[in-house]
Image: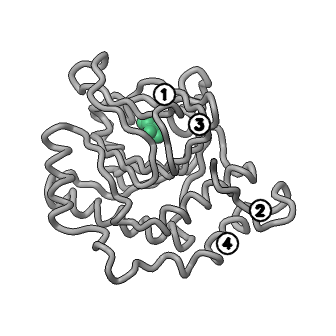
């Protein structure tokens, strides 16, 4: 059973998005500080591990619950739940700008882009920025920036096998997915299936979207798929990019 979330506004449909986000930021600011005995979110050794996972296998899955802290994960989940319940999330598409296609046979999730403004998002962006710099120092990927969105998959939603970037576009280079769901069971569906980068018929890993679990992979190389979820599945995806100019945040 999920813990019920109380939406701190009267009429979600007429309240602008930033108010919903402010409500979250305001109530959770004090939760964002890491307690002193907590492991540093990002250490040199840990960045070494990420870099070797990516260079040797093209992908990896790891548990970052202790690094990010249960409070930050809970605050991020609360944000995405509020966005979802206030209808602030948009049907996701494939492609960008004029090429954007909303093809429900390929993907059915809903997304909302993060701006890094609320306290939980600011803490998360700091974490992503350390990863960006750490990967650049170790793998010379020239990652200039990252973009990140929340995603909600309701029961029955999926995302068929795909790559996150077309070869040679030098846009999305490294993909990161962070999951926000407590007590996710295999029977809840919604697993991320990762395929062999040299054979897109061969599953080489299955990741359950449990809170604190993170998947990291090379965007142009690693085919992956989100299996149909049997309960609401919350996550956020982040792409580290080589291009400098942000595209309009849509789709
Ligand atoms: O949520 C996931 O496990 C993966 C999502 C994904 O592949 C994407 O948004 O491109
Ligand atoms: Fe993807």
Q: Which residue is mark 2?
A: 16
Q: Label 3 near label 2: C-beta < 8 Å?
A: no
Residue 208 at x, y percent in the picture: 42, 39
Q: Which mark is residue 106?
A: none
Q: Secondary structure at mark 1?
A: loop
Q: Earlier in the sequence, mark 4 or mark 3?
A: 4
Spatial separation of the CA atoms under disc 4 and disc 3:
24 Å
10 Å crowding of disc 3: few (<14), some (14-19), many (20+): many
**Whether residue 53 is situated above or below residue 34 in the rendered picture:** above
Q: Quadrant of residue 97?
A: top right
User: Could you tell me which residue is drawn at 29 percent across and 41 percent down?
Assistant: 217
Q: Which mark is residue 22?
A: 4
Front: mark 2 or 1: 1
Residue 163 at x, y percent in the picture: 37, 30
Front: mark 2 or 3: 3
Q: Secondary structure at mark 3?
A: loop
User: Could you tell me which residue is drawn at 42 percent across and 28 percent down?
Assistant: 225
Seen in the image, is 159 located left or right of residue 83?
left
Q: Which mark is residue 109?
A: 3
- Is the distance from the Cβ of mark 3 to the nearest ligand 1 atom less than 8 Å? yes
User: Could you tell me which residue is drawn at 46 percent across and 65 percent down?
Assistant: 70
Q: Earlier in the sequence, mark 4 or mark 2?
A: 2
User: Could you tell me which residue is drawn at 53 percent across and 34 percent down?
Assistant: 188
Q: Earlier in the sequence, mark 1 or mark 4?
A: 4
Q: Which residue is mark 1?
A: 227
Q: Label 3 near label 4: C-beta < 8 Å?
A: no
């Amino acid at each position: 059973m999920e813990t019920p979330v109380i939406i701190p506004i009267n009429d979600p449909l007429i309240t602008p998005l930033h108010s919903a986000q402010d409500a979250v930021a305001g109530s959770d600011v004090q939760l964002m500080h890491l307690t002193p005995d907590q492991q540093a979110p990002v250490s040199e050794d840990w960045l070494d591990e990420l870099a070797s996972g990516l260079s040797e296998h093209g992908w990896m899955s790891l548990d970052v619950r202790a690094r990010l802290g249960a409070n930050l994960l809970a605050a991020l989940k609360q944000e995405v739940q509020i966005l979802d319940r206030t209808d602030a999330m948009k049907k996701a598409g494939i492609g960008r700008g004029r090429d954007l296609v909303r093809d429900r046979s390929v993907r059915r999730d809903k997304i909302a882009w993060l701006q890094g403004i609320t306290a939980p998002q600011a803490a998360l962006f700091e974490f992503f920025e350390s990863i960006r710099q750490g990967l650049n120092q170790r793998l010379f990927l020239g990652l200039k920036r990252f973009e990140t969105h929340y995603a909600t998959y309701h029961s029955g939603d999926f995302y068929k096998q795909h790559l996150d970037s077309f070869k040679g576009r030098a846009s999305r280079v490294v993909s990161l997915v962070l999951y926000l769901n407590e007590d996710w069971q295999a029977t809840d569906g919604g697993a991320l299936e990762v395929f062999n980068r040299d054979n897109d018929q061969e599953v080489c890993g299955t990741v359950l979207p449990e809170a604190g679990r993170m998947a990291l992979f090379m965007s142009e190389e690693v085919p992956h798929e989100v299996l149909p979820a049997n309960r609401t599945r919350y996550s956020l995806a982040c792409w580290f990019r080589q291009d400098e100019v942000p595209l309009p945040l849509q789709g």
